[in-house]
Amino acid sequence: MPDLRTALLEELREIAALPVPAFDPALADDFAATGRRLPYETQYFARRRHLAALALVGDGPALSSLLKDVCQERSWALPAHWEAEADPRTCVDLFACETAQTLAEILRLRDDVEGAAEIEAEIRQRVLDPFFNADFPFWWEERYSNWTAVCAGAAGMAALALDYDTDLVRGRVLPALSGYLFSFGPDGGCVEGVDYWVYGFGYFTYFAEAWRDATGEDLLAGTEAIASFPARAQLYPGSFATFGDTGSDTLLPAGLFTRLHDRLGVPLPAAARAQTFADDECARWAPLTRTLDWGRPLGDGVEPGRSLLADVGWFVERRLIGRRMWALAVKGGYNNEPHNHLDLGSFLIAVDGEQLLCDPGAGEYTAAYFGAERYEQVHPSSAWHSVPTVEGAGQQLGEDSRAEIVDAEHGVDVYIDAYGDGALIRKFAWTGASIALGDYGPEITESFVSRIRPELEGDRAVWTGERGTLVLHGVNPEDAVVDSVDTTDHRGAPDRLWALRFGLTGVPDASGLRFELL
């Protein structure tokens, strides 16, 4: 079996040998007309994938031709991020900054690029001049999220590749990245989930190492808790808690993780398989090139473990029952987080990485998904998380809607204030090969969500997966219903969710719900 670097280079050669992907500039207007992002973004990222391959293993004329095409794009930013009444050419978003970094590092890497001066001018005019010469901070410099680290980090790496004065970079980039770090609590948890940790803290790390090479200063010192987050949120090799806008197939850039392990001594997450460039749907240059430079294969095993991240409000516990790894993950926090879902007190149960009770994760990104109708969309709504209604009401949006997770002897208790006048307490406890759930509050109607259809058998519900079976004891058979919804996942593929719903009215003991793990 080829090593990681050899396998990636072979994949890149195969990509470079293909025809340059078609690119229809008119699709940039599709988002404004329909609200859909995928038609334009699919071709945008296909072009970026081909560009990376040509830059690393292709010949000069083909690379120069594609670079010229990229420089003729109306904007390097995605249409979903264009601002009304502003010139999209100078929109400084995630992907404009990534493109600037990619092109700047290609110019440093390759001395056979035609029109290098013109390419550098485009980098400066589209991204670096608007960023370094701005009179006011960008919104992402004041509201900290993955955007902060990616935009500032990528723009900073572009500037370093073009030999900008380090004092200029220090004054503009480092304050944004310091703010990004301050957005983490002492436990290092990321409210945006593991996918956006990989994105945001990944670009922080890539810039930090470029900055260390340029100045000798170490920005990674003291970030061990943040760097440990993915390993603490892991359910199984390649599988993580999918709270918020997280996907079920998290990208694990080997270069990022092995660098953090080597520099900080933090635990490595486990991968289900060796990942490829094709696994990165956005075809990002920084994770690819740093994996080529730093990467080693990740391990493929996880041990039982327990993590309570009280600051961010996540609990993850893995237990080996027989020969299978079962996991319980519970979500606290607040209902106005970046990439927020109405999911306080929601939970998932997984066996060997298969979620029998699921968190839906990210849906397809559209205008509505990030607009006023966000919580009418399936994936972010409280109706399609495993949370109850209280007195007939779902969870409310806002900073004041909060849930605190408290450690308990055999699990955790969750204190939830997100239902207006109605409060809810959820108590989770492992009892051998079962997980007990107690819900306490007025007029509770339970909802348990899965991508597997439950079968009702009297006061039991059964979810039969490929790797295990989950049996819920204590169902109220008099009003139990199963409903479903068809939607699309983050990549636009069909996604069907099932929900079991029943009221606790008439159930003698609200703490009598028990999930049997088979």
Image (cartoon, rainbow, N blue to C red):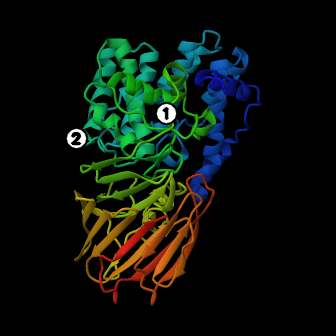
Q: Is residue 206 above or below residue 494?
A: above
Q: Position of residue 497 (x, y in %)?
A: 55, 67
Q: Position of residue 136 (x, y in %)?
A: 30, 36
- Residue closest to the far front: 322
Disc marking residue 186: 2
Q: Is residue 181 above or below residue 243?
A: above
- The quadrant of the picture occupied by the N terminus is top right
- Residue closest to the far top: 111
Q: Is residue 432 left or right of residue 222?
A: right
Q: Position of residue 402 (x, y in %)?
A: 25, 62
Q: Is residue 337 above or below residue 16?
A: below
Q: Is residue 197 left or right of residue 293?
A: left
Residues at marks 2 and 1, CA–CA distance in whole angstroms = 27 Å
| Crowd tier of the residue under label 2, counting other residues whose Cα lies within 10 Å: few below 14, some 14–19, many 20 or above | some
Instruction: Please name the residue shown 45% across and 83% down the image.
Output: 459
Instruction: Please name the residue shown 57% across and 20% down the image.
Output: 119
Give the residue at mark 1: 299
Dot 2 amino acid type: Pro
Instruction: Please name the residue shown 58% across and 38% down the image.
Output: 273
Q: Is residue 233 above or below residue 344?
A: above
Callout 1 secondary element: loop
Q: Position of residue 332 (x, y in %)?
A: 30, 58
Picture quadrant of residue 443? bottom left
Callout 2 secondary element: loop
The mark lying in front, picked from 2 and 1, is 1
Q: Nearer the viewer, residue 500 or 193?
A: 500
Picture quadrant of residue 243? bottom left
| Crowd tier of the residue under label 1, counting other residues whose Cα lies within 10 Å: few below 14, some 14–19, many 20 or above | some
